[in-house]
Image (cartoon, rainbow, N blue to C red):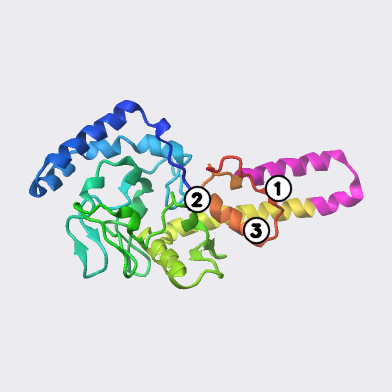
């Protein structure tokens, strides 16, 4: 997961106006008509998909996966219908007033957004999950205090939420060793709810990390050989390899956050990481 900077200038005005008109209509409806109205207007948030993709270089905002053959969902970070807090507690009205608010949208791989069964038989995936920390305020239709809520899920649009993300040698999404307490619990729960360690996703992430590690080792070995050769041709080869490695760290590359973490642990020099496309 890498920071995504939302940019309304990428969204056509007519798309925003359609969402605004739906919001105005929703505000006028009685409570018992809202869910059905929202359900019939699903084309509105789906219409934002390609513009959200531009903000993340075509990658899932949660997993950083980039699969041209996969469909992406437009996830409502705060669920538009029911909001599941625990296995026993579900707020049936959820965050209906955010159904057409594009700032509540996150581009999501379907494996992250929809419920799945992992290799151990456990249910993972976001679905309608939106747990809050103990003692948190809770927003409602009549008291829309979302800024006062303390979310359990980490959010790719909140840079501070991503500080302690790490990946182990097997490519699993984990909390940094320096992250403890509530912060570590948030990362652990987010990994489960977003399905970030489903086997196929973990394997794809591990493969990206493995390729970067092997390329770094090749560069280091080639550089050691050059010390005694003094030949320009091998140096040009190393420069090409460095550029290949840097491409794997760019914000538009799949799993670049994991690749960067891997290189940092291997003591790679900072110039081997390309941050030119990172959101400010």
Is residue 64 in the magenta section? no
Categorize mark 3 by other alpha carbons within 10 Å: few (<14), some (14-19), many (20+): some
Q: Residue furthest bottom?
A: 181
Residue at point 25%, 52% (across, down):
144
Instruction: Count all numbered tags in the image, as a single digit.
Output: 3
Between residues 192 and 29, which one lies in front from this camera angle? 29
The answer to the question of whether label 2 and label 3 lie on touching residues, with beta carbons closer than 8 A, is no
Is residue 134 positioned above or below 196 on the image?
Answer: below
Is residue 200 positioned above or below 237 on the image?
Answer: below
Categorize mark 2 by other alpha carbons within 10 Å: few (<14), some (14-19), many (20+): many
> Which residue is denoted by mark 1 in the rendering?
271
Residue at point 32%, 48% (across, down):
75
The secondary structure type at the circle numbered 2 is: loop
Q: CA distance from mark 1 to mark 2?
A: 19 Å
> Which residue is denoted by mark 3 in the rendering?
264
* Magenta span dominant secondary structure: helix
- In the figure, is residue 246 to the left or right of 62? right
Which residue range is magenta in the image?
223-247
Q: Is residue 40 visible?
A: no
> Which residue is denoted by mark 2 in the rendering?
2
When asked about the image quadrant of residue 67, the answer is top left
Q: Is residue 265 visible?
A: yes
* Residue 227: image location, x then y, percent: 88, 51
Dot placed on the residue nearer the N-terminal end, 1 or 3: 3
């Amino acid at each position: 997961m890498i920071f995504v900077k939302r940019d309304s200038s990428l969204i056509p005005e007519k798309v925003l106006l359609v969402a605004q008109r739906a919001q105005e209509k929703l505000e006028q409806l009685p409570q018992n008509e809202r869910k059905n109205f929202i359900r019939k207007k699903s084309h509105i948030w789906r219409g934002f998909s390609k513009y959200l993709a531009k903000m993340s270089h075509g990658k899932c905002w949660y997993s950083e996966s980039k699969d041209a053959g996969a469909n992406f969902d437009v996830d409502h970070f705060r669920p538009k219908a029911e909001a599941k807090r625990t296995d026993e507690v579900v707020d049936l009205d959820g965050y209906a007033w955010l159904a057409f608010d594009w700032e509540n949208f996150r581009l999501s791989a379907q494996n992250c957004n929809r419920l799945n069964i992992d290799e151990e038989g456990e249910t993972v995936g976001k679905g309608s999950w939106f747990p809050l920390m103990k003692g948190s305020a809770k927003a409602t239709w009549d008291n829309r205090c979302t800024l006062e809520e303390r979310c359990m899920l980490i959010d790719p649009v909140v840079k501070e939420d991503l500080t302690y993300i790490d990946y182990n040698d097997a490519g699993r999404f984990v909390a940094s060793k320096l992250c403890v307490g509530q912060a570590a619990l948030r990362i652990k729960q987010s990994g489960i709810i977003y399905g970030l360690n489903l086997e196929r996703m973990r394997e794809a992430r591990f493969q990206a990390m493995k390729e970067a590690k092997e390329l770094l080792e090749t560069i280091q070995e080639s550089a050691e050989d050059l010390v005694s050769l003094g030949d320009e041709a091998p140096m040009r080869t190393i420069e090409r390899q460095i550029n290949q490695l840097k491409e794997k760290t760019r914000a538009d590359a799949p799993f670049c956050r994991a690749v960067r973490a891997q290189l940092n642990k291997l003591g790679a020099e900072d110039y081997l990481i390309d941050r030119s496309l990172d959101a400010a």
